Amino acid sequence: MISVNSKLRDLFAQPANIHAHSLVRRTVVFFVFFALYIVCLSADFIPEKISLQVGQVSDRDVIAPRTVSYVDNVKTKKLEMEVMASVANVYDMDIAVMSKAEEDVKNIFKIAQTVKMDTSLTLEQKQDKLARELPVTLSASVIGGLLSLEDTDSLKTEDYTKSVLRKYLQRGIRDDDLDVARKQVVLEAEELGLGKKAESVVAGIAQVLIRPNFILNVRETDKRKQSALSNIESVRETVRKGQILVRRGDLVTNEQIHVMEELGLYAGNISEVRILGLTLFVLLIMGISLGYLYRFANPIYTNDMYLILLGIIVLVTLVIGKVAHYYSDFSAPIATGALLTAILIGPRVGLLISVIMALLFGVMVDHDLRAVSSALIGGMVGVYSVTKMAHGYSLSRGGVWIAATNFLVIASTGLIQQLNGTEVLFQGLLGAINGIASAVITIGILPYLEHAFTITTPIKLLDLAKPNHPLLQRLLLDAPGTYHHSVLVGNLAETAAVTVGADPIVVRVGAYYHDIGKIKRPYFFIENQAGCENPHDKIAPSLSTLIVTSHIKDGVDLCKEYKLPQVIVDIIQQHHGTTLASYFYKRATETEHGECVIESDFRYEGPTPQTKEAALVMLADSCEAAVRSISKPNVNRIEATVRKIIRERLQDGQLDDCNLTLSDLKVIGDVYIRLLSSMFHSRIEYPEALKELERRKMKNGNSNKQLAGKDDSNACNGTNADAGVK
């Protein structure tokens, strides 16, 4: 596992030239994850093959795998035909028809009068001649009637014929009304009371001359029909997820086949349009996500390992969500991705992942707003619940928060949709189980991702801070003074970290281990001498400096042996920076070869603190050791000492790279002064009580022994903190 991790880190380590192979490498990673996301999300787009035919008896229940809304072309066409039939045709009246009819009536009677007056012709000849000369074809009975009318009756018959034609033509006659109009003309003539001959003449001429005078306006009619069609909306049908399309034993209909085709079920059809839409959607989400990281989380964007970690988290969460989604949309633990990201990388990126996961999960659930809302809000609450605070976080507590939130979201949205109460309660319980499952899955996956990507989480740091850790146990047994000193430094630095925006957990754990290297030679450091002779009094200052400064390298070696995270190693290496071992340097300059002493030989190797956390440990370490060396500490002396230490470190350039401002240093000083004053304040003497104690000691005969023990302890303190601790 270690070799695989090292190869992975070497593969994606930043090259000396940051642009070398970076674009190619990132492009490959981008499209690999893109392809994996598409495969995961499009699994439902490839349905089971269904080959039912119209009229065939179905051998199964066909159930809609998702909700789809489609245009029913058959019903839409039927509706269009109904609308077009309901639009009345537009007709224009032809006034020339009536004029022509009246003109023809006049000519008929005029010609009939002329023929009738020709005495040289017989009746049959007159009928033949009249039939030939009339402008229209009339029946023999009508022609005979015309010839038999008296002059007075002829004029009256002509007027009535014109009147009947005018009556009907003025109302307008369409093609489909012509037959009805001709029948009504006959009835109209019979009611005139002119006699049978005259009535037959009126009816015969009117039936021949009456014709449609309403002409269809094709252009206007089409225009109105097109206008009516433009206002028609296509008939859309919606099939809900889980709806039975064809029941077992039913005869398959054309409409059912059409619905299966729309769902992509028929004969295993794959919708290229859906695949294209999914491709664009995933590309858009990935592009916007990278843009967010570039703009608001650039350290993550520039680190290929972090980008790979994010890709893996999203992929794993999608796979888990898809498996759970087949049981219920509300049981998918989508908040897992947000929890892992918030813990391993940071809460801001965790919120981004919660949004991404909700959007991608929406594809699985056909954009069901209730399921998407639950995934989104649950993930955001999960990020909030594991935000790094002074005492770390609890995934168990986070799971409870997510469970409660999911229940409320699902219940409230169910009430909005007026769903059945039992159904809403069941779905809410699934959401609560989903929240607990998110925390459980996170707990299970987290150690593997921590190890694979060498990320130190608050949980791992809190485990290192436990007193039963083997390395702390060694420190307690082999160097108890250093252990006590480290605990005090941890309390100081952690309290100050909260006020200046540093990570209090990193500071506390770093302080516990910052002097861990003193385990190898504990008695060369004054806090572990406990009344013994100071070995530095018998060796050269240069050797003492070498021994004292070597506890940094020894501490790093122990960290590697016990596999402590790099953030702790950095604090160990940086908590002294490049400061001067002033006590030994002064002793060296006071020897006979003092003028040959090189100051750099008496400085720590460094580097100087690169983070706020390392700087806080440096200042807490120096201030605690310096204040402990004050013979009679009081608030004024402690304040003067702390301010002096901070000022010296600032002037020596030790704080140039740690991003602390002068305002931060003032706040840090105030915190250290307050805490150190409470730790090392002078006790008030009570004379009477002391006299009584003295008398008791005299009686017991052991007062000298107790006082001697105290004096020996003070004697071991040396003349300067650098003689032992520093």
Image (cartoon, rainbow, N blue to C red):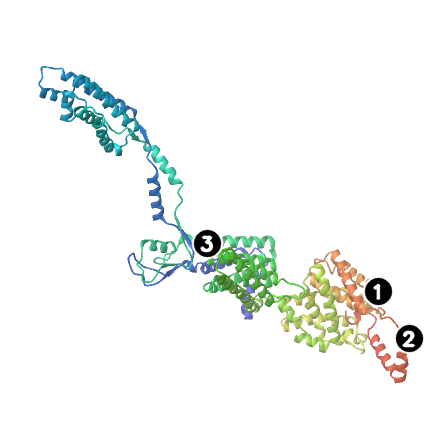
Q: Which residue is mark 3?
A: 279
Q: Which residue is mark 2?
A: 688
Please state which amino acid type lies under the numbered disc 2: Glu
Q: Secondary structure at mark 2?
A: helix
The alpha-carbon separation of the residues under discs 1 and 3 comes to 69 Å
How many marks the image carries: the answer is 3
Checking the image for residue 637, the label placed there is 1
The Cα atoms of the two marked residues, 2 and 3, are separated by: 89 Å
Image height of 417 relative to 217, above or below: below
Q: Residue furthest front?
A: 193
**Mark 2 vs mark 3: which is more N-terminal?**
3
Vertical placement of residue 343 versus 704, above or below: above
Q: Residue at x 75, y 71 (%)?
A: 485
The amino acid marked with disc number 1 is: Arg
Crowd tier of the residue under label 1, counting other residues whose Cα lies within 10 Å: few below 14, some 14–19, many 20 or above = some
Q: CA distance from mark 1 to mark 2?
A: 28 Å
